Image (tube, rainbow, N blue to C red):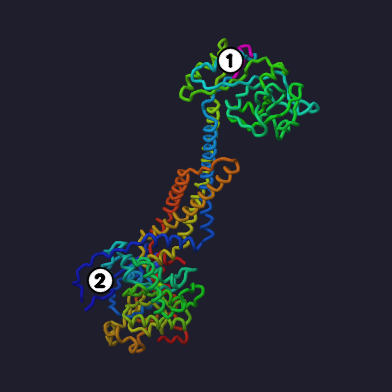
Amino acid sequence: MTPPTVSLVDVSRTYPGGVTALAGVSLEIARGELIAIAGPSGSGKSTLLNVIGTLDRPTSGTVRIDGYDVPALSDRGLSALRATTIGFVFQHFHLADRVTALDNVAGGLLYSGLGRAERRRRAAAALERVGLGHRLDHEPHELSGGERQRVAIARAVAGDPPLLLADEPTGALDSVSGAGVMELLHDLNASGTTIVIITHDREIAASLPRRVGMRDGRIVSDSAADPSHPSHPSDLTRSNQPTRPTDPSEPTDPSDPTGSTDSGDSGGRPAAGAVPGSEAA
Amino acid sequence: MAASRTERPEPAPARMRPRDVLRVGAAGLRTRPLRAFLSALGVAIGIAATVGVVGVSSSSGAELDRTLSALGTNLLTVSSGRTLLGEEAEMPPDAEAMIERIGPVESASAVGRVDGAQVYRSEEIPEEQTGGISVYAARADLLAAVGATVRSGVWLDGATLRHPAVVLGATAARRLGVGAAGPDVQVVVGGERFTVVGVLDPVPLAAELDAAALVGWPVAEEVLDFDGHPTILYTRCEEARLEAVREVLAATASPEAPNEVEVSRPSDALAAKQAAGRAFTGLLLGVGGVALLVGGVGVANTMVVSVLERRAEIGLRRSLGATRGQIRTQFLAESLLLSALGGAGGVLLGAAATTGYALQAGWPVVVPAWATAGGLAATLAIGALAGLYPAVRAARLSPTEALAAP
Ligand SMILES: Nc1ncnc2c1ncn2[C@@H]1O[C@H](COP(=O)(O)OP(=O)(O)OP(=O)(O)O)[C@@H](O)[C@H]1O
Ligand SMILES: [Mg+2]
């Protein structure tokens, strides 16, 4: 069996001010999974994603990404790992202004060691893949929000990273655009990319084969570990569409009874499940 | 489980090609073209000032060299000074002949001041308006000895030396309002009408002739009561033995009172003037240096602001796999590019200013390669210095911190 793409064991992250954003998180994500991370605002979702993405180092615990022992790697080693293995998608796209979609995507391959012509070729292919083959020469201000996010996704996957991390990729989009973006992520997953998505949207979370709920820096629910759920990660990778709507245990629900006690931050931002008419797939 | 998997070697980041480094640096500048232009302009002004100052002074130096090689540096001048009692000293009338007897002397010529003779444009023009013009009796070979050239008309020759004919120095002609020589152009010299047969160009090696009215030695003696004593002797000698000639010149020209005459080498005086100009050039260069420094501060400021504004971009690049070194290199490249653009513009500007100034002054155009190279080198040093701190700061940002920026 292939090693898990992501393996966290008892990972903690405490910020200098004393805030414990992650308190003993253990999580394994297998190759090919599509997984939602949900939870109230301030529960540590972004911190977790940054640790998985090697942008942040844990205060303690073991982090293995694609077989590498992350805390043991130097900053250079982590950079190389990100360049080859991990793609990021952000809520606010982070596209360069006044730069065409093609060059924005090609710029994502700048640190891959590829030549310019090859970068542009792959960028064009990636844009084609996200359905923007007709928008290569458009600058961000000439694109809709959904199109911008698709450009950002093209940038993240242009180098074919095995792992894609998305922090609220639909957070800045209306429901229709958001649904388009989710469809794209499903397609990418179907072609083999492991994808981790942070979302506040109940329906989006419910549409994903595996859901992890967080609160106060801990994982409070994981549909994969739920014995009532017929899931083994390797099953899920192949059968995400059919199993999608079946799970009743809603991880984004702030009233989740298994939550911990301290840190009154919970319930800060309501789960954005109220968005009407979001029809993924 | 695959926990038994052996430790993989640390992944190595790919090297960025130099062309990509340049491209990323240029892209950073292109997003804010006006700001880039203005801060490059600061450097450009500094470089232009320095290159211009060096260029103008080099061009004027080249002009001096050209003048000297045309006029020769083997001219020695003996002029009568004052006696111990403060009276005007006199050289003996045969001084010229005595000097010609010195071995290495190639030729000698002389002028003698005609005391008391005034020059007017015409009898009606009052004295004050044409003052400051001295009348000199001159030998026929004077022109060759001092390397003077005639701007208009002719020099005195065998016939005109004995006739009331006068050749005016450049300044004298201007003061008298004489534009060109001609048979109808006359001035009044010592109360007699003289025909202006020639007007000289300025004489660099004998500036005293510029404000002179030169008449033939014989006519001066006959008509103007000239006493026949030479006032200034012009001596051309073998360049290699010039110092030896110089030592004996005073005693030869005025054996009875050698300390009452002054021996000088006019080309030295010209070079000394040039050296004095060089001190001033040094001062201007300092001003240019300060301008350059201010330009450098402008670049540093631009870079600091740029790093502050572009934290999100830095975070994005780190998430895409840029190492700290690559971020540092990017901002250094940007800063170097910015000041190099300014430097190149400044060199062009400075060279253009030099060319314009030199052409207008009739000098050869010289923009020394060392000034150009030095300017560009200074530019790159400034770019590196100005960019270093911002680049290091950009590289030190943690990726999460940078990405959290709005
Ligand atoms: N740089 C930081 N310094 C100090 N505390 C931080 C920092 N970043 C995050 N935190 C704190 O860590 C906790 C977890 O933050 P995190 O951003 O992971 O939450 P989140 O689940 O992503 O929230 P949201 O849904 O609002 O994005 C919060 O209490 C937050 O205030
Ligand atoms: Mg977050």
Marks 2/1 in contact by CB < 8 Å: the verdict is no
Question: Dot 1: what SS?
Answer: helix
Q: Residue furthest left?
A: B4
Question: Can residue B151 be seen?
Answer: yes
Read off the residue under disc 2.
A67
Q: Where's the C terminus of chain A, which quadrant? A: bottom left
Residue A251 percent across, percent down from the top left: 36, 81
- Residue A174 vs residue A2: left or right? right
Please tell me the numbered disc located at residue A171.
none
Give the residues in magenta: B79-86
Tell me which corner region of the image, top left, top right, bottom left or bottom right, holds residue A73. bottom left
Query: How many neighbours does mark 2 have within 10 angstroms: few (below 14), some (14-19), or many (20 or more)?
Result: some
Chain at numbered mark 1: B
| Amino acid marked by disc 1 | Ala
Seen from the viewer's position, the closer of residues A35 and A135 is A135
Read off the residue under disc 1.
B95
| Amino acid marked by disc 2 | Gly
- Cα gap from disc 2 to disc 1, whole angstroms: 106 Å
Tell me which corner region of the image, top left, top right, bottom left or bottom right, holds residue A253. bottom left
What residue appears at the point 53 percent right and 17 percent down from the top-left corner? Answer: B249
Q: Residue furthest right?
A: B124
Residue A241 percent across, percent down from the top left: 34, 87
